[in-house]
Image: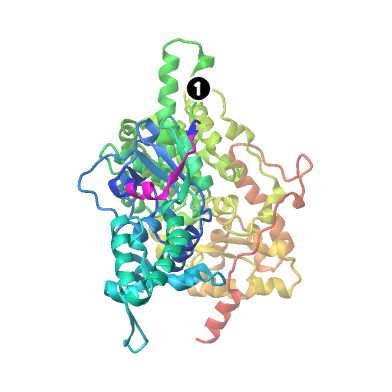
Amino acid sequence: MPFDSPDVNLGDLLKDASSGKIQLPDFQREWKWDTDQIRSLLASISLGYPVGVLMTLEVGGDSGKFLPRPISGVTLTDARAPDQLVLDGQQRLTSLYQSLFSGAPVNTKDPRGKKLVRWYYLDIATALDPDADREDALVAIPEDRIIRNFRGESIADYSTTESKCRAEMFPLSKVFDSTAIDQWMVNYLQQDPTHMPQRLARWSEFRSSVLNSIIAYTVPVIILKKETPKEAVCTVFEKVNTGGIVLNVFELLTASFAAHNFRLNLDWKQRQARLNAKPALQSVESTDFLQAVALLTTYERRRSYLATGEDPTRAPGISCKRRDILNLSLADYQKWAEPVTLALLKAAEFLAGERIFQARDVPYRTQLVPLAAIRVVLGNQADLHGVAEKLRQWYWCGVLGELYGGTTESRFARDLGDVVEWVNGGPEPLTVGDATFNSARLLTLRTRNSAAYKGMYALLMRDGCLDWIYDKSIDLASFFDFRLDIHHIFPKYWCSTHAVDQGRQESIVNKTAISFSANRMIGGRAPSEYLPLIEKRAGMDADRLNAILRTHAIEPTRLRSDDFDTFFEDRKRALLAKISSAMGKSVDDVARDGETLDSFEEEAPDTVDDEVFELLEAAG
């Protein structure tokens, strides 16, 4: 990555910013420094102290094809293309331009965020005092140049050149205008003609020791050559940006596409609105969308290469890493954006079929990326019975095998190729083959923080569990109408008074999906007490409720006898059978490969307020 590193005169930098030779790429955030930060920066410059390196990118190569915008405060009379774009140093460069070169007051804020408009002056007396702090010599003055007390009364007026000269307040907005400096000096000397020699000596000391430090100040600049690839630009920006802001690839691609008069952010907002109409898709992010586009772009590129009959070992790979997204052309995006949107909407239908209705219950948002790409490649074939069954098996192996929780880009790419090949008669995908579930994991599934917990919740509903009060199967409407959620079967209060350890108490084995109304009936009671209340509330007999309990993989005799230990073992086996069925493979009720309960990270328990329900009921 070639670059130059010259020291550039500050005045020349500000001149280039004013003319538009130096601009910002559109992915840079807005300027936001407060007045104290500006004063501190000006003080350092006036003392000749280093204030950091400016980093820019030459315009002209592919990496420089970003929509530019002027430094804040610069007004360009023509839409000239910049020579360089600022990658690091925007806040410093903008602060210096506005305070020293723009000729206008600075729109800033105080440290609390209140908006201010300020001019910056150097108090000559304080600046020349060797014992004074230079920041104390930097004075920020209101737009009308009048300082007032809390009653609004003027206590200092610097609105005329004469008043500034008398107070020895030099306006820093004139520091790079030699003619204005000379005129100001003349006015300064004329304020006291009888002591002109002394004033001239004082002025000369101020100019040589303070003003000249600013005028002669040089800034080290690293200029990245135009050949620098986009991925390097993105990485460099993240590493050196002093604001600590991570550059999202979506923002970088937005700036790149804007150079071709395409507003990616507006296009995404429209697509996002379509996706958000499906509650399960409301957490899908712009980068998820771009990853799916990159998967399809690289998949097609690989397939086209293989069709030529050339050496298959040299075929480009399927990938959706950052560099692949940054290398997307506008044509690539426009080709795949609508198919990906439609595939994600189809994915929401798939999730609803698996009884996953809202974003917080989606086990892995990231798994939607390869699912969408797979659906685009398969087209209508994805809806055939046999193909849909394979997609379900792949999906549940990813969820219950907890395979999408770490670095996932390589799995995205592998699954796209593997699943499509599997559907067309190829071998089983690695995600299906590698997925395992240890029975000990059930004891540590306690919250929505784990994908497998959410998965078990959905499997129970998918396999036909009924609400304990309302005679409704669980679909999208009833899910939200009845405020279904996952609740304890043996309540927390009962468990705590019967010495049930917290591990089993909070395990998914002791929880199921029921309505808010049913959970209120449970309160903190023993099952033998709350089951008759539910029968009475729902107007049904014990046999009917027993049948409903079995749809939740619960043996009712265990509940009616308050036999927690036997209930727990029975239900654990029943849940393992459901997991085995969903994954399409055997799940043994034993630890394998040396795994034990200690192999899994314990989770904090859900906040399920059985006691609150008791209090509500007591209150009537």
Q: Tell me if 555 is positioned left or right of 22 in this view.
A: right
- Please state the total of marks drawn on the protein image: 1
Q: Would you identify the image quadrant in which residue 110 lies?
A: bottom left
- Above-or-below relation of 305 to 490: above
Residue 100 in percent (x, y) is at 36, 59
Residue 577 to residue 166: above or below = above
Residue sitting at x 28%, y 44%: 263
Element at badge 1? loop
Magenta stretch: residue 221 in it? no
How many other residues sit within 10 Å of disc 1, few (<14), some (14-19) or many (≥20)? Answer: few
Note whether 566 is above or below 17 in the view shown.
below
Residue with the most extreme right position:
594
Q: Which residue is nearer to you in this view: 51 or 156?
A: 156
Q: Which residues are magenta?
A: 4-15
Residue at 44% of width from left, 44% of height from top? Answer: 8
**Which of the pair 568/139 is nearer the observer?**
139
Q: Is residue 5 magenta?
A: yes
Q: Is residue 91 left or right of residue 164?
A: right
Type of residue at label 1? Gly
Choose between 67 and 383: the one closer to the eye.
67
* Left or right of residue 493: residue 253: left
* Residue 374 seen anywhere in this rendered image of the structure: no
Q: Which residue is mark 1?
A: 425
